[in-house]
Amino acid sequence: MITLNKYAFYPRIINPAKFSHAIIFSAEEDVRKAKNALAESMPWTEVHVLSDPLSVSNYISDKASVIIVDDTAIVVVDTERIRQNNKDVVLVLLSSNDFVHRSPPSVALERYPYTAKADLIFAIDKEELIPNKILPSAVRCAEDLLNIEKYSKERRFIFLIVDDEPRWFSQFLPVLYNIIGQRADVMVARTFEETLKFLFGVVLESEIDDDNYLTIGHGDDVVCLIADIFFPKGNDLDSDSGKDLIRLIKKYYPRIPIIIASKAREAQDLRDTAFILPKGDPGSLQTLKKYIHDFTGLGDFLIQSKVGKELFRIKDIYQMNEVLLEAEKDTKQAEILREILEMYAEKDAFSTWLYMHGFRTLGDIIRPKRDRGPQLVSALKEPIEREISRMHSTPLVIEGKRVFNLHDLLNILQNVEPQKIQKLSDNDVFSTWLDRKGYPELAEELRPIHGSGVKLKKALVQTFEKWINIYQQRGKSRPL
């Protein structure tokens, strides 16, 4: 047994409750075949394909589980019994019904009552939304839902998607999860009332508690809002409730970046407060990926002037400190930079970026800071410099061995038994440690890699070898 030093690395587990079992019951062969894609993307989950409704209805487990059904299967299983027999279970409907794909919940329910039996509904088809692509992100969204609702003891980081039609968020979620990895969760809401309940813990806007809203709902956990303009509000199925939602976000959570995914003319009126994404346009998902990478703390820390000119693109904590050193100078240019940094601090941009890049404690220290001018720069720079000074003494521990650099980590990966590293991969521990060490590109490429056995080990080793070579060619100043 080893004794760790006081700067030991403790990764944050975003979803403490992981699905131990996934049950697939479907008449559609493509859904059953998607078992392999799910097992590879979520190797901590045992995936089972059942063939009769009685077995599914009688399913019992004391472990967190997800039940995946299609439009035919959900009609013949006893979902009430499943919920009674399983404390932590989520039911996911993969619907191939185009009407369900494009309808608000109440409209789909009226024609197809079985939709009420599912906790989450996703769209599948035989062209763009193939089950092999949709199932892994649908199950991950179900795992997020379980953790948000039942296991939210620590502050979480949540992407809130508000759209009443399953087709769009089904298309988008695989892209989003590849960026997120295990750093944040996703919550899907389909009506104005669902969204209010999630953000503020109320059903009516008039019930929002101006004094205690931060502690009642989940709004303080949200790091990005992605919403349509039109989704149901009360009995109005065509309500432009997106405008009301944005108004509330700007009032109570002005730090949250907003993306309006809509082609509607009304969306253009909100350009001053949100990023407008024409939903469904060619390249729209790639545009959305770039925005999320730059403005939600998941990728680079992009600092822009007041007119939107890119001034700095920060990739690691070392570069962040260099910008703060520039802002510390006694020049007119530094004074302007300090004013810009004040805007970012007011929106918790520094702490959010630090949280997403593995600096949880540092993010907690910086988050309450509301200083201005030179005082703000000092309040940011001093704890960041302390963290940097500790970096060389913050090892990653694998099988009792302390790792301080890339070469040592590669050596361990080449020689360790695969099962000894799978849990580290499952929880993005490698990526988080590498983010902290200042290797964001390597961390980002590792983040979507999951699996088990020799295949996982080979993928990790090849990725490390590739990036060590790249860093050596670049002449990276920090030790490899």
Image: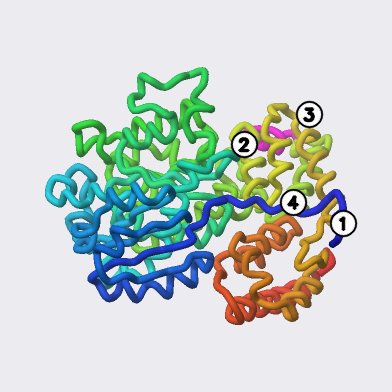
User: Please, what secondary structure does the residue beneath circle 4 have?
Assistant: helix
- Given the image, on which type of amino acid does mark 1 rest? Thr
Q: Which residues are magenta?
A: 335-344
Question: Counting residues from the N terminus, which is met first, the one under dot 1 or under dot 4?
Answer: 1
Q: Quadrant of the N terminus?
A: bottom right
Verify CB contact (< 8 Å) between mark 2 and mark 4: no
Residue highlighted by disc 3: 375
Cβ–Cβ under 8 Å for marks 1 and 2: no
Residue 249 - label: none
Residue pointed to by mark 4:
317
Nearer the camera: disc 1 or disc 4 = 1
Work out whether residue 467 or residue 396 is closer to the camera in this orientation and state it.
396
Placement of 153 over or under 176, stated as above or below: above
Question: What kind of secondary structure does the magenta stretch mostly adopt?
Answer: helix
> Which is more N-terminal, label 2 or label 3?
2
Q: Nearer the viewer, mark 1 or mark 3?
A: 1
> Label 1 belongs to which residue?
3
- In percent of width and height, residue 240 lies at 27, 35
Q: Is residue 207 something one can see in this rendering? A: yes
Residue 79 image offset from top left, x and y in percent: 27, 52
Q: In what element is the residue under mark 1?
A: loop
Residue drawn at point x = 80 percent, y = 34 percent: 378
Q: Amino acid at mark 2?
A: Asp
Please give the name of the residue rendered at 83% of the width and 39% of the height, measured from the top-left corner: 382
Name the foreground residue: 150 vs 366. 150
